[in-house]
């Protein structure tokens, strides 16, 4: 006899494109062989199915296999509720459409009756009808037409509202259900007990349509920005989040959630490096239609099975020589540990995740149970919060825009790796924008742009442009002298570290010569492509100027582009 076993999801490990789901069920069994059936499982990767358990001494696992349960409707309660609601709304829509058709038929009947007015007038002239009968008939006819028009308008409004509600329910149902196939998988487990007792069974499997990716909230406060050294050195409160989304067809309710950076989907074998050939072009002539062989079908790629051995089927009945091992336990923080009562004005703190460093991956284990519905929407879970030191500076490229951008160079002093992900930036609790943090190892730095600093004014102006036309004795050359001045003013109450980047022209033609006359002051960085960088600290109320002077020479008959 097959015994149905109710199980619940207890632990989920989410990877970049799939998830490892563990579910557990308990029941009491008599001594002997039993076949357990776990129903209504989503379509998981069958090669990844594993079973383990704990029972009385001598309990053995005889075999595990999967089968398909063919169902008329999805078995999940939420899907059944939505499907029932859609069916009810659809019936209401059909009833309103039938009523609308009945009203339309009566309107046509009343209209046809009104077309009999000439016959009524003839009966009135012949004395068969009295004038009062004529007035009563048309008054009743008019009243009926008004009632039908009002009822038809009400039905049209109700029908539109019901159709909109039905479409919304259908969209919600389509989002929640796992495709259009209502069938589910079932697992059959054969066990043997030498004595009666309690059996605890655990199943684990990999399932697709689940993923996670890191995200960050970076917050900076300028409470001390203009006092002391607060204008140069500060700190960023970085909140690391994991955005989990899944559409597996089953909700994860109150599970122990772990987020892993491992990539089980990628091959574990190094690909073969083949020779790189270079050859002459060989034209390929396409055969005429109907004369050549049919084109070969494209190769079909199959997912490689898990390298670990899968459980035996019922036909093989692979007996396990040793008793079933105990269920693996997950290290979960004890939430019942005594904590000091926080003051009433203290802000609530979300528990972070426990970070586990493995040989090739990082695993973040959430500190409390998490619920992730199967709706395909991202759900946030806290990984960790850090306060990282940063250096503030004003960066500007006045040749492109005369605006001062505030930039923070943040050092990763968290002791762990910061994964690549998007970061939302908040300055004084105001949303500034979104940037992206690259993979950052401990001790490395990354940069965040925090918006514009209006307390620093920057101007770049052309102060000289002189053109000299040379004669034949001078090589028939045109000499153009340029001079630019960059002015930086600090109107803030504290000093600012300023970075100014600019560029000088670079010739791409042998007949065009560029001579740098002077750069004052000398930039701290100067590349081979004449990209300049000045770095300096500007006190409150201070002004700094930089001047560039260069000469461009070219033949008078040569048309030059790229010059102002």
Image: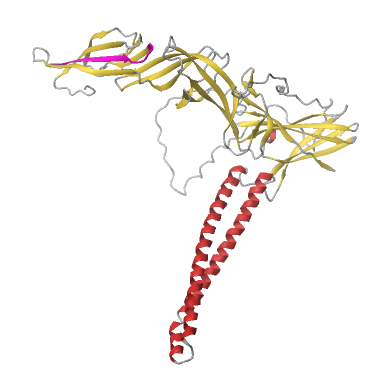
Please give left or right for residue 187 compared with residue 282 in the image: right
Q: Quadrant of the C terminus?
A: top left
Up-down: is 359 above or below 21? above
SS majority, magenta:
strand
Nearest to the observer: residue 557 or residue 547: 547
Could you tell me how many numbered marks the image carries? 0
Q: Is residue 392 visible?
A: yes
Residue displayed at 34% across by 8% down? 524
Nearest to the observer: residue 219 or residue 399: 219
Residue displayed at 49% across by 91% down? 128
Q: Quadrant of the N terminus?
A: top right
Q: Position of residue 561 (x, y in %)?
A: 22, 24
The part of the image, by quadrant, that contains residue 45 is top right
Q: Position of residue 121 (x, y in %)?
A: 43, 86
Residue displayed at 64% across by 46% down? 181
Please give left or right for residue 65 compared with residue 257 in the image: right
Q: Which residues are magenta?
A: 477-496
The part of the image, by quadrant, that contains residue 465 is top left
Please give left or right for residue 180 compared with residue 522 in the image: right
Please give left or right for residue 312 compared with residue 182 in the image: right
Q: Is residue 266 visible?
A: no
Q: Position of residue 168 (x, y in %)?
A: 56, 48
């Amino acid at each position: 006899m097959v015994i149905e076993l109710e199980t619940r999801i207890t632990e989920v490990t989410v990877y970049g494109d799939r998830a490892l789901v563990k579910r557990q069920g308990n029941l009491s069994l008599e001594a002997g062989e039993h076949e357990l059936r776990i129903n209504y499982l989503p379509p998981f990767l069958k090669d990844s199915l594993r079973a383990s358990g704990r029972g009385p001494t001598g309990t053995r696992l005889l075999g595990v296999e999967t089968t398909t349960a063919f169902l008329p409707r999805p078995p999940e309660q939420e899907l059944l509720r939505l499907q029932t609601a859609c069916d009810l709304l659809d019936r209401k829509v059909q009833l309103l459409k039938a009523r609308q058709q009945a009203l339309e038929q009566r309107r046509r009947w009343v209209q046809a009756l009104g077309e009999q007015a000439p016959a009524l007038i003839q009966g009135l002239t012949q004395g068969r009808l009295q004038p009062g009968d004529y007035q009563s008939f048309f008054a009743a006819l008019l009243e009926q037409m008004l009632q039908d028009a009002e009822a038809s308008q009400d039905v049209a409004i109700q029908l539109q509202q019901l159709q909109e509600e039905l479409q919304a329910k259908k969209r919600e149902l389509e989002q929640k259900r796992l495709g259009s196939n209502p069938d589910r998988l079932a697992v059959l487990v054969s066990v043997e007990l030498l004595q009666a007792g309690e059996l605890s069974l655990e199943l684990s499997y990999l399932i697709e349509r689940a993923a996670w990716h890191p995200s960050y909230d970076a917050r900076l406060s300028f409470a001390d920005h203009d006092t002391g050294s607060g204008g140069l050195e500060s700190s960023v409160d970085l909140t690391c989040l994991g955005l989990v989304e899944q559409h597996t067809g089953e909700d994860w309710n109150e599970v122990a959630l772990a987020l892993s950076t491992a990539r089980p989907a990628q091959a574990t074998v190094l690909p073969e490096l083949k020779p790189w050939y270079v050859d002459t072009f060989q034209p390929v002539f396409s055969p005429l239609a109907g004369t050549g062989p049919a084109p070969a079908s494209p190769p079909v790629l199959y997912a490689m099975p898990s390298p670990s051995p899968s459980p035996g089927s019922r036909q093989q009945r692979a007996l396990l020589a040793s008793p079933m091992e105990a269920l693996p336990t997950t290290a979960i923080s004890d939430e019942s540990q005594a904590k000091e009562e926080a003051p009433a004005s203290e802000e609530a703190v979300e528990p972070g995740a426990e970070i586990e460093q493995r040989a090739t991956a990082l695993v973040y284990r959430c500190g409390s149970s998490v619920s992730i519905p199967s709706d395909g929407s991202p759900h946030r879970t806290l990984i960790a919060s850090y306060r990282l030191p940063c250096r503030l500076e004003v960066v500007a490229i006045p040749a492109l825009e005369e605006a001062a951008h505030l930039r923070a160079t943040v050092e990763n002093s968290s002791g762990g790796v910061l994964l690549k992900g998007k970061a939302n930036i908040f300055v004084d609790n105001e949303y500034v924008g979104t940037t992206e943090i690259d993979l950052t190892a401990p001790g490395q730095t990354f940069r965040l742009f925090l918006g514009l600093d209006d307390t620093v004014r920057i101007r770049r102006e052309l102060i000289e442009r002189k053109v000299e036309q040379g004669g034949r004795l001078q090589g028939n050359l045109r000499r153009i002298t340029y001079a630019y001045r960059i002015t930086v003013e600090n109107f803030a109450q504290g000093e600012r570290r300023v970075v100014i980047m600019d560029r000088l022209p670079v010739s791409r033609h042998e007949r065009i010569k560029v001579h740098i006359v002077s750069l004052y002051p000398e930039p701290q960085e100067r590349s081979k492509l004449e990209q300049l960088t000045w770095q300096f600290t500007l006190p409150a109320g201070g002004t700094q100027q930089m001047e560039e002077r260069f000469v461009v020479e070219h033949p008078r008959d040569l048309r030059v582009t790229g010059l102002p």
